[in-house]
Image (spheres, rainbow, N blue to C red):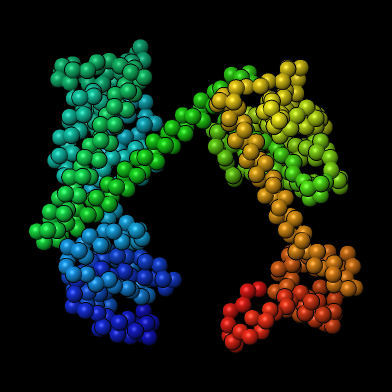
Amino acid sequence: MPADRAVNLKEKVRALPERPGVYLMKDRLGRIIYVGKAKSLKKRVSSYFQRGRAHTISQPKVRAMLDLIHDFDTIEVKSEPEALLLEGRLIKQWKPRYNTDFTDDKRFLLVRVDLAQELPRFVLTRIRKDPRSRYFGPFAHSGLLRRTLAQIRRQFGVLLGDGTPQKLPDGRWQLYDDVRQEIYGHENLVTAADYRPRVEAACAFLDGKSREWLETLRAEMQTAAEKQLFEKAAELRDVIQALEGTLKRARRFERDRTLLRSDTEALLALQETLALSVPPAHMECFDISHISGTFVVASMVHFTDGRPDKDHYRRFRIKSFIGNDDFRAMEEVVGRRYHRLAEEGKPMPDLVVIDGGRGQIGAALKAFIAIGVEPPALIGLAKKHETIIFPDERAPLNLPVSHPGLNLLQRLRDEAHRFANTYNADLRSRRLRESILDDFPGLGPKRRALLLAHFGSIDRLRAAPVAAIAAVEGFGPKLAAELHAFLQPAATPDELQAPAGGRSDP
């Protein structure tokens, strides 16, 4: 820690009261990195800045935090129980990095269920590391948790971590031996499909138990605080915060599973409706955007498993002509996209969607013929009546507005439209900024092009010194100085009156 900062912090510590409160440690950017409570603010906060303290701490995360402390704030309260409760509220509000780390280090027990397994089991763990699994907990009372797991095995007939199911020749599973079958009273020979509802029911039961435990823990924490058992109250507070986080993640997990089921249904519906060989897990959609024939651009968006896959989005500027011709523009960008995929040996999408009607899809089909590539499944989506257009002799198709496949196509088309319009707006904005060069006398198209090629944008040109402009071909010191002065924004009266050293916007 720099000497001047250490002196300032120690002076600030000396001014602290010998009273309970909460302290907030900050890094050099003013971000809160840790919140703590204290019976005596002065004693507790001063302990962070004692000489050699970092070398006596065994936890690397705590030592790392000490190196980052640049400043601190304190909030004085009337009592230590009040400090405990305020600490919990502030941690929930600010979610400081190091409070989260310390809580995670306690490693309370969790229950993990990997729903991707054929026969999911309920397994105890202390580490949350598999995003595909669902977790319940953490639980501070390990004995109660183990009794609860034994209860759900009896009540729902599910497998725990010690289960060793055996697969039979007919495809069914034997969950337990005969003795266990008599004990637990459930069918012991099941298919994976028979077993799945048991898992869902046990998860719902554990979810409800988690919420019951949360209320119990809150009451226990309040009682411990009232009895001035502050260490116990603080430990319960950590468990409560972690359990609240688990329940929040569980809600998100269930929402994501619901969306996944919905997307899967939509893909299967499209496969059936469009007579595809496979569900269209990979779909690409093209849209053309222009304003009265100017700034003509195209977009291509890619959905994987029914969701936007932005790593595969592409934007195109029309190169083969100038003017307003949606059909020629569509033919160009479709040809460029799939000629490149074919050259690179990359797989084609399962379905290509064209924003438009018969003319646009005809242009797309023409592009495939021109590049000599067999087109994948190809349709158009005409917006007026949301009509599906086929490139062959099939009649246009109108699906019910609630059809999941149509809804997915609409999301795909709307995303392509949004992406194309955003690109168009970016180009218009850039062209408006570049047009300022048209107003500088004596600057022809060639030198304008050289400037923009050299600096990349008007903003970079405006920020460049005279010497950098003079280094561009066709510019000398005099012309460079005149252009530099021309590009600088005129000062407003308020700016002219601003004190020296004041901040001004570029």
As drawn, is 123 to the left or to the right of 398?
A: left
| Number of marks in picture | 0
Residue visible at 36% across and 40% down in the picture: 251
As drawn, is 400 to the left or to the right of 88?
A: right
Q: Quadrant of the N terminus?
A: bottom left
Judge whether 311 appears above or below 490 on screen.
above
Residue visible at 28% across and 40% down in the picture: 136
Residue at the left extreme of this rendering? 227
Judge whether 160 appears above or below 136 on screen.
above
Judge whether 377 appears above or below 87 on screen.
above
Residue 113 visible in rendering: yes
Is 406 in front, or is 13? 406
Residue at the bottom extreme of this rendering? 500
Q: Quadrant of residue 459?
A: bottom right
Q: Quadrant of residue 331?
A: top right
Residue 314 pos. (x, y %): 67, 45
As drawn, is 466 to the left or to the right of 113?
A: right
Residue 149 pos. (x, y %): 20, 33
Residue at the top extreme of this rendering? 170
Residue 167 visible in rendering: no
Q: Quadrant of the C terminus?
A: bottom right
Residue visible at 82% across and 46% down in the picture: 293
Residue visible at 74% across and 27% down in the picture: 374
Residue 353 pos. (x, y %): 68, 31
Judge whether 253 appears above or below 425 on screen.
above
Residue 465 pos. (x, y %): 73, 79
As drawn, is 26 to the left or to the right of 376?
A: left
